[in-house]
Amino acid sequence: MNRPLSRVFTSLVILLAGSLSALTQAQTAQIPASFHGTYSLTFETDNPQAPLPDGATAQLVLAPGGALCIADYILTDPQLESGNSAEAFWTAGDAGVRLALSDISGPFSEINVLALDGSFLGQMTGTKISDSTTCGSLNEVPPNIEEIDDVFSLAEQAFADLFPTAVSDASLRVLDGFIYRHYEGSGAFIGINNDTVYLMGGPFGDQPESVGSISGVLDQLYIELGMEPPGGGDNPGDMPDGEFTLTVSGSASGTMEGVPFDQQFDPLFVIDSVASPDSGDLQAMEDQLIAQLQESMESVESDAVSNVVISEETVEEDRVFFNVTFDVDTSDPPMSLNYDLDYEFIRN
């Protein structure tokens, strides 16, 4: 990776000052809650340039936060255009289409499919079959979709060389639980999984690198800008100071010296006096985790630990809790284990 991740996101703060105000001025369409749910639709077209054949069927989900899910796409940030309050438009730049939902001022009617230049490609009609807002490819309701969308759009405005987009795009893709966007111009990916932001590809290397939780990164951005974070900085990126007792419990499974291994730890280890972690810097948390593993398990080297994911943070004045999953692979002794651990810090 050519540029340290912390430096990338610190620079992001400085360069985005003007972008934040411009973004908030966009005329976003508000999708009525009555529209939320799963639809069974049929595509009708006589246009040979249409993205689907005439008669094709699909399930489409309208979810909270303006999310539209179809196949492995999540479309975000629906817009009103030209004073038309009856239609909401989503843009899928890499698919070369726009979707126009009608009529958001009344009952559901249809979704018109347009080319990026506005020419008509076809129409999807059908009925709502359930109130479920679970996106099929994600297997859950899209989480924090407005904040997730901000991560992508602001990064693209600030770092056009790293995250170049040829056209306006409000589409995200889903793969193995990651909500992501790929930037062909640089080879880079931005991905989000379990409330954690990752960078990969191009200058960032061939393995996902965590750069912080969504709320932690947003808090850090506000603080670096000299602004108070929403909620006064009480999000899980704002850890209390002091000395804590750390208890780690959980499980490990895999193989050890060729033998299947599956064990519960209650606890794995306890450290009497440690400082609480800084979730605004996940790399620091990963370094702390590896140091603690090395202290409790002499055979573990730092380069043996990979795929660290930190999530489920809870922060209180006298208690900090988070979940960590990671892999440990060593050759001497030969073992390949996946850990799922709960870290609990209790103030001394």
Image: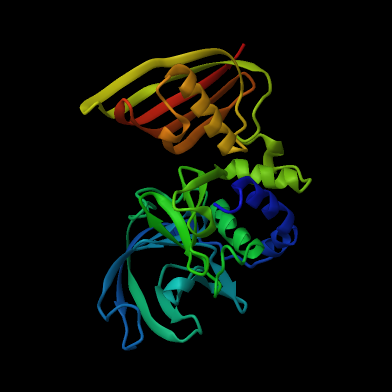
> 46 and 185: which one is in front?
185
> 186 and 32: which one is in front?
186
Q: Quadrant of the C terminus?
A: top right
Which residue: 71% across, 46% down? 222
Left or right, 95 with respect to 332, comes to right
Q: Position of residue 302 (x, y in %)?
A: 47, 31
Left or right, 31 with respect to 54, comes to right
Q: Is residue 319 above or below residue 94?
A: above
The picture quadrant where one finds residue 155 is bottom right
Q: Position of residue 150 (x, y in %)?
A: 59, 56
Left or right, 190 with respect to 281, comes to left
Which residue: 48% across, 63% down? 187
The picture quadrant where one finds residue 166 is bottom right
- Asked whether residue 177 is in view, the answer is yes
Q: Is residue 216 above or below residue 152?
A: above
Model colouring: rainbow
Q: Position of residue 8 (x, y in %)?
A: 64, 52
Q: Is residue 112 above or below residue 150?
A: below
Left or right, 41 with respect to 237, comes to left
- Asked whether residue 101 is in view, the answer is no
Which residue: 60% across, 66% down? 161
Which residue: 49% across, 13% down? 270
Q: Position of residue 204 (x, y in %)?
A: 52, 54
> 82 and 245: which one is in front?
245
Q: Residue furthest left?
A: 259
